[in-house]
Amino acid sequence: WKKIDLSNRSKDELYEMEKTFNDMIDSLKESYEMQEIFVSDASHELKTPISIIKSYAQLVERRGMDNTELMKESIEAITLEAERMQKLVEQMLALAKNKEVHHAEVVDMNQLMEETIAIFTGAYGREITLKHDSEAHFVQGNTDQLKQVLYILMDNAHKYSEDKVDVRIGEKDDAVIIDIIDSGGGIPQQERDRVFERFYRIDKARSRNTGGTGLGLAIAKSITLAHGGKIEVESEAGKGSTFTIKLPAFKKMDSEN
Ligand code: ADP
């Protein structure tokens, strides 16, 4: 370990260093404050399932022993809340883990989208149409992380709309552009940026019923940004929403040169 010796530094150099240190302190303070807000929001979100589990456990203790109906209902509620907590914890970890690209490879977005759509048509019988030109659209990134982005957006289109969902993939100005278009209730103008914030939900009760945590879009945004891309939403109240991801296109020739 070497001690810092500032005795030979000029006034200008010292001034520059002071400025650098103060900027560092400001950004550390900001990230510390954001961390604090996250911990407080996360604790708040976990409190609800914990208190529901506790009250059902007390109910069973008091009146459940000879009441099988009540016992059954309580076990179901406890299981549901435990699953909610598990999802919350998993998504909080996903948020922390997805600030950077894990291992980059060349990913065919048409194929990834087809695989994601198959999950929703298979499991829920949703009518989803995929439109893309005959070309393949490649990006450089991590398959699992990109799949997670597509899954989150498809899952929202499925949860928040009942009618058909259209998906478009194309390329413009060196970017692969994916639109996921639903015909649900839409997102009011003033909420459009906020939906990407952690834990933000427009209708808390509805989102809770559909198993929402308010973290999906924050994770999708974090992964997209890590890949050098962008995520946006356009929406018309009562007509539906279009979520768009733009990712830098990868030209196969790039690697051959
Ligand atoms: P959640 O787990 O609640 O779905 P998200 O972060 O994925 O969390 O989304 C945040 C909120 O944005 C949702 O609670 C919902 O209110 C709104 N939202 C997201 N996608 C859509 C959509 N396709 N249509 C209408 N509202 C949406």
Image (spheres, rainbow, N blue to C red):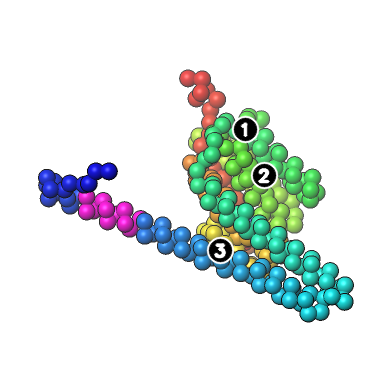
Mark-to-mark CA distance, 2 and 1: 15 Å
Task: Give left or right: position of 12 versus 105.
Answer: left
Mark 2 or 1, closer to the camera: 1
Residue 123 point in image, percent of width and height: 79, 48
Q: Earlier in the sequence, mark 2 or mark 1?
A: 1
What's the residue at 63%, 29% (across, down)? 135
| Secondary structure predominantly adopted by residues drawn in magenta | helix
**Magenta region includes residue 255:** no
Q: Please report the bounds of the magenta region as a residue range.
A: 17-27
What amino acid type should be assigned to the residue bearing mark 2?
Val
Q: Quadrant of residue 105?
A: top right
What's the residue at 60%, 33% (across, down)? 107
Where is mark 3, residue-wise? Answer: 42
What amino acid type should be assigned to the residue bearing mark 3?
Ala
Asked whether residue 17 is in view, the answer is yes
Mark-to-mark CA distance, 1 and 3: 35 Å
Where is mark 1, residue-wise? Answer: 108
